[in-house]
Amino acid sequence: MTLRELDSGVYFMDHGEYTRADEKFRYVLQNIRSVPSDLTFHFGKNSHLLGLHKQSIDWLNKYIQLKGTTGQYYQEATKWLAKAEAEYLREKDEASQKTKQLLSSNYDIDCGPTGKVTCPVCQGSHVIVRKGPFGDSYKTCSYCNEHGILTCEEYNKLLRGELQR
């Protein structure tokens, strides 16, 4: 019964019904004791087609580990693996660029009704402790006032790297 589900998953994948194929493959994974190497290939390929590139990489690598270079799907697995890795790297790069753009934007954080925040550099102690090989060294925090507090304006400048002391 489970192997029929595997076959129907391959059928759905071959006919562009990747979500249905994914359901079939997951059913097989949940209802089988030993995972067939063919399932690792098909699940990896289908995962790539669904846009789940990290998952695809994991399953295709598992297929190659299990079958080596002599596996029935080895050539195709390496092709899909290369595609999945390229897409995964592209997605990571896009996410990195979005984060970089967000962090470099000139935005202000609302500090609440008091307009003050605890200094993130010294955690409000007004003292910076540095661990050294000959013991700790203590230095007064140059960013906040003597109570370890920053105004909202100072805090936003600190986050942008503009607060000079």
Image (cartoon, rainbow, N blue to C red):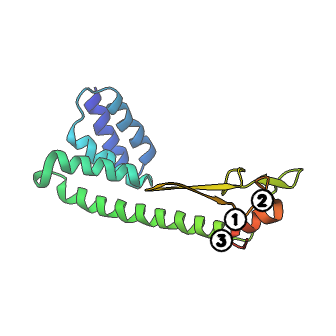
Provide residue 3's location: percent of width, then percent of height.
25, 32
Question: Which residue of the protein is positioned furthest toward the front in this rendering?
Answer: 134
Provide residue 119's location: percent of width, then percent of height.
72, 55
User: Quadrant of the image for the C terminus?
Assistant: bottom right
Question: Which residue of the protein is positioned furthest toward the right in this rendering?
Answer: 113
Mark 1 or 2 closer to N-term? 2
Can residue 15 be seen at all in this image of the molecule? no
Can residue 140 be seen at all in this image of the molecule? yes
User: Quadrant of the image for the N terminus?
Assistant: top left
Q: Quadrant of residue 7?
A: top left
Mark 3 or 2 closer to N-term? 3
Which label belongs to residue 31?
A: none
Label 2 is placed on what type of residue?
Answer: Ile
Label 1 is placed on what type of residue?
Answer: Leu
Q: Which residue is mark 2?
A: 109
C-alpha span from label 3 to label 2: 13 Å
- Going 83% across and 54% down the picture, which residue do you hit? 116
**What is the secondary structure assignment of the residue under circle 1?**
helix
Q: Which residue is mark 1?
A: 159
Label 3 is placed on what type of residue?
Answer: Ser
Q: Which residue is mark 3?
A: 104
**Tag 3–tag 1 contact (CB < 8 Å):** no
- Going 79% across and 59% down the picture, which residue do you hit? 145
